[in-house]
Amino acid sequence: MSDKTILRALAGETLPTPPVWMMRQAGRYLPEYRATRAQAGDFLSLCYTPDLAAEVTLQPIRRYGFDAAILFADILLLPQALGVDLWFETGEGPRMSTVTSQEGLRTLKGKDDIHEHLAPVYETVRILSRELPRETTLIGFCGAPWTVATYMIAGRGSKDQAAAHALKDTDRATFKAIIDLLTDASIEYLSKQVEAGAEVVKIFDSWAGSLKGQDFTDFAVEPTRRMVETLKARHPGLPVIAFPREAGEGYIGFAKATGADCVALDNSVSPEWAAANVQVDGCVQGNMDPRHMVTGGDELIEATRRVVRAFENGPHIFNLGHGITPEADPENVSLMMETIRNP
Ligand code: CP3
């Protein structure tokens, strides 16, 4: 039996104490992250400097002893490797050159031509697989094709993903070609992460919630299913976590439909509902509201206990429903850890 509790939960084991990690656990709420980021200069330089990216990945493990470390990188490095221009506007977020036509698509690289650009990411994974404590699981990741496409088509983040929906509804062929390229390239990207030492991969579909009905099946379920199928054929036994954020009812049956070993839940669904409707099919991850990491106190303790209790009769990885925010108090993370481990 593995001494890695994350791998045991992903294999379907119900553990007396759920293993735990946090989305965005390496991030601006930590003073040591801000110091390393300042040393790197900017966010993208941090992502592409293996020693520093490995260092920020390790910081929350040293401070809190999380059961998993997630590679420090970003979902938008993949489109950048395909040839899209990418930069981050301070205080605003990502900006990219847009791809909205067949001509635009023809300027991009092929799925196998991304590895030179992404070599520093693979090097970060190699450093981490050497340096992590032996009980800590290393998670690699990428964005799901739909979520990455929403940034490529709009050139930035957007609340309603209107530009991507418009292309999907007016130029289906181009939209499908973008999704297919991202699906194929993501498979190659995750494969290299696994070869470098990632033990689990997670697919972030942050905007899955804006796909409805058949679109959800075609562009959230199907690309993930194809990725899982190909990755598991190449890397037998590789556990996959899928995060179709804000899928709502779409969470039901998502693991079966995609072949994912674990469904990560956002905090818009109640843990009791998710235990009854999603955890019945296997491991779930989530789903405390990240605002408790800002507000803390008894409410944080109660919310932590509620999530632990709701999922205690099945396989569960404790996490937040979305990333921890820069305003969070590092002390509140300690309080959450104590509450999970000594309820
Ligand atoms: O979780 C982790 O700690 C691993 C590293 C990681 C980052 N981004 C680092 C990051 C992961 C897994 C991501 C995923 C990611 N990136 C997603 C999907 C998950 C989600 O949050 O919904 C998305 C949509 C992105 C794209 C992205 N990157 C945006 C929209 C932004 C700006 C918003 C923000 O939080 O500032 C980023 C920047 C980013 N990615 C930061 C970090 C730590 C902040 C950069 C900084 O230090 O200034």
Image: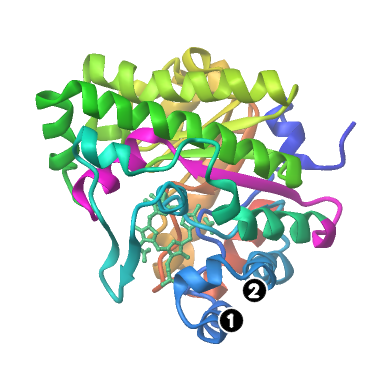
Q: Indicate yes or no whether the magenta region holds residue 17.
A: no
Magenta extent: 130-156
Q: Considering depth in this image, is 118 or 90 the residue closer to the camera?
A: 118
Name the amino acid, label 1. Thr
Q: Secondary structure at mark 1?
A: helix
Residue 268 in view in this figure: no
Ligand 1 quadrant? Answer: bottom left
Quick one: label 1, few (<14), some, or many (20+) residues within 10 Å? some
**Quick check: 104 left or right of 144?**
left
Look at the numbered disc 2 and give the secondary structure of its residue: helix
According to the picture, the residue beneath numbered tag 2 turns out to be: 52
Q: In percent of the image, x 23 and y 50: which residue is there?
A: 98
Vertical placement of residue 167 versus 34, above or below: above
Q: CA distance from mark 1 to mark 2?
A: 7 Å
- Give me the residue at 48% from left, 83% from top: 41
Q: Residue 179 placed where, x, y %?
A: 34, 29
* Residue 315 in which image quadrant: top right
* Closer to the camera in the image, 107 or 332: 107
Residue nearest the viewer, comparing 15 with 98? 98
Q: In percent of the image, x 49 and y 53: which residue is there?
A: 302
Q: Are marks 1 and 2 in contact (CB under 8 Å)?
A: yes
In this view, the residue in front, 199 or 134, is 199
Can the viewer see residue 77 in this picture?
yes
Q: Quadrant of residue 215?
A: top left
* Way the structure is coloured: rainbow
User: Label 1: which residue?
Assistant: 36
Residue 198 lies left or right of residue 118; in this view the side is right
Three-letter amino acid code of the residue under disc 2: Leu
